[in-house]
Image (spheres, helix red, strand yellow):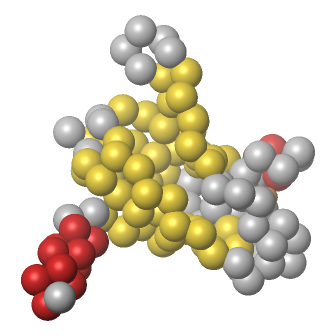
Amino acid sequence: MLAVVLLLSGTVAASTRIDVQLDEWTLGFEELEVAAGRMEFRVVNRGRMPHNFRLDWKDARGEAYAVETPLLQPGQEYSLIVTLGSGTYEAWCTVPGHGGLGMAGVVIVTP
Ligand SMILES: [Cu+2]
């Protein structure tokens, strides 16, 4: 049992944790740089309205990909665990209008 616990904590330590605080009208960052690999976006809605957090990107062939949290109610949090290669990722809240109000940014993943 102890070995299992150690193994799990080792796995958690191997991912980079990024805290994302959603609020009206910000993701808490405009540009964020992180090293490639496994990462955990710990997304918290600190606002008074529902928000979510989504990443969009394209691979070398132009194929589009996305990952997103569910719609988070005020006070809710969600861990988005994803492995990302180097590149530029568009981050935004998909609730209509929110991206344009400022809930948009860029995540730059370095090699
Ligand atoms: Cu929003």
- Residue drawn at x 35%, y 42% is 84
Q: How many marks?
A: 0
Q: In the rendered view, would you say 92 is above or below 18?
A: above
- Give above or below for 23 relative to 69: below
Residue at 84%, 66% in the rendered image: 50
The image position of residue 82, as x and y in percent, is: 41, 50
At which x and y percent is residue 24?
80, 68
Q: Name which residue lies at 15% across and 75% down.
A: 7
Where does residue 3 sit, x and y in percent of width and height? 11, 83
> Does residue 10 sit above or below 31 in this rendering?
below
Q: Residue furthest bottom?
A: 2
Residue 17 sits in which quadrant? bottom left
For the N terminus, which image quadrant?
A: bottom left
Residue 92 relative to residue 108: left or right: right
Frontmost residue, 80 versus 104:
80
Q: Residue furthest front?
A: 1
Q: Horizontal placement of 65 versus 3: left or right? A: right
Image side of residue 90 versus residue 81, left or right: right
The image quadrant where one finds ligand 1 is bottom right
- Is residue 104 at least partly visible in the picture? no
Quarter that holds the C terminus: top left
Is any part of residue 79 visible from this angle?
Answer: yes
Closest to the observer, 12 or 44: 12
Locate residue 21, reporting x and y percent: 61, 72
